[in-house]
């Protein structure tokens, strides 16, 4: 959120992945009032194409959101990019210290723990600082939906939500002009007050609609083994042992969340060969 700069948002996955592998995100855009989002957004493959065609090779200023390292598709263009800002809640890998530091480096992570459940909480906090008046419903719906999904509807028992997430949701709910989004009536509640209609979002209904899109069995049935493993894969590094020079070496391991019964997943065509190939590709 900026007051004095023009920003072009880039989705950090391919258009194909957005259309075929992110049903909850497509639904989120629909509820925010953005139809056919895939035709209106720019994706990482669009950016790599532009960088390849840029004959002048002018450096592009980049703000990383929800990550503090370069997307693997952009690493080949690292010399053409200047990372000038980071807004993230994962462990700071210490990259881009020369171009991104001080107030421009927001990494909400400390003592092995994220300080917020969602990077959108950080965006919402900035919105609160700089915005005047009420928020457009499209902005409120997008931020609210992601925070609810990332925090599992602010469920304390899951162990992810923080007070900052709750405060962000409260602010979004109270300051968004929800009347703009009334046509999406199944998540809006009409509260009459002295003859006046006031609309607000049923956060439980909104969360469940988005969450159910991720768990929809028909969606997971259509995914190949490789696509399913890559859908929500997280990678971690730990120091395992000393090498011959006496330095600690890092071991990488990954966890892939596949939202379907294990036996059914293992019955997919090519389970063994695709799993092994996926593991080799991520080494």
Image: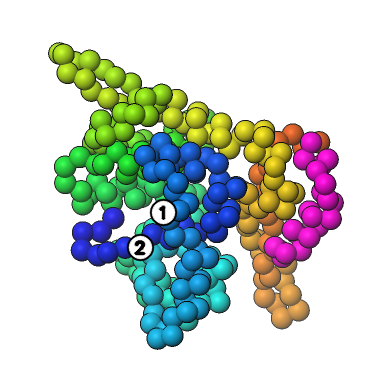
At horizontal 60% and vertical 47% (from top left) the residue drawn is: 21
At horizontal 39% and vertical 68% (from top left) the residue drawn is: 62
At horizontal 36% and vertical 39% (from top left) the residue drawn is: 33
Q: In which quarter of the image is the N terminus?
A: bottom left
Query: Who is closer to the viewer here, 65 or 205?
Result: 205
Query: Is residue 237 depicted above or below 158 in this figure?
Result: below
Q: Name the residue under label 1.
A: 40
What is the span of residues highlighted in magenta in the rendered image? 264-283
Query: Who is closer to the viewer here, 122 or 72?
Result: 72
Indicate the position of residue 37 as horizontal and vertical percent values. 44, 48
Q: Earlier in the sequence, mark 2 or mark 1?
A: 2
Task: Name the quadrant containing residue 201.
Answer: top left
Say whether marks 2 and 1 touch (CB < 8 Å).
Answer: no
Disc 2 to disc 1, how far (Cα)? 12 Å
Query: Who is closer to the viewer here, 35 or 239?
Result: 35
Indicate the position of residue 7 as horizontal and vertical percent values. 31, 63
Horizontal placement of 258 versus 31: left or right? right
Indicate the position of residue 56 as horizontal and vertical percent values. 40, 86
Q: Mark 2 points at which residue?
A: 8
């Amino acid at each position: 959120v900026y007051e004095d700069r023009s920003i072009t948002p880039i989705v950090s996955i391919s258009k194909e992945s957005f259309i075929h592998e992110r049903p909850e995100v497509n639904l989120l855009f629909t509820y925010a009032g953005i139809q056919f989002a895939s035709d209106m957004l720019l994706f990482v493959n669009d950016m790599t194409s532009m960088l390849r065609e840029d004959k002048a090779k002018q450096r592009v200023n980049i703000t990383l959101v929800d990550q503090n390292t370069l997307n693997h598709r952009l690493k080949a263009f690292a010399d053409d990019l200047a990372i000038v800002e980071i807004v993230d809640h994962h462990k700071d890998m210490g990259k881009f210290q020369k171009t991104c530091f001080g107030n421009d480096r927001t990494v909400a992570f400390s003592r092995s723990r994220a300080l917020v459940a969602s990077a959108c909480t950080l965006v919402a906090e900035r919105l609160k600082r700089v915005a005047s008046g009420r928020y457009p419903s499209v902005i409120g719906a997008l931020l609210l939906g992601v925070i609810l999904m990332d925090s599992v509807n602010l469920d304390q028992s899951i162990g992810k939500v923080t007070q900052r997430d709750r405060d962000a949701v409260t602010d979004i709910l109270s300051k968004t002009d929800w009347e703009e989004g009334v046509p999406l009536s199944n998540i809006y509640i009409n509260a009459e007050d002295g003859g006046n209609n006031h609309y607000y979002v049923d956060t439980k209904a909104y969360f469940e609609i988005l969450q159910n899109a991720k768990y929809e069995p028909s969606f997971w049935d259509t995914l190949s083994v490789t696509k399913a493993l890559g859908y929500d894969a997280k990678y971690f590094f730990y120091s395992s042992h000393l090498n011959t020079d006496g330095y600690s070496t890092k071991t990488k391991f990954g966890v892939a969340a596949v939202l379907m019964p294990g036996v059914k997943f293992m019955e997919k065509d090519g389970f063994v060969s695709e799993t092994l190939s996926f593991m080799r590709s991520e080494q």
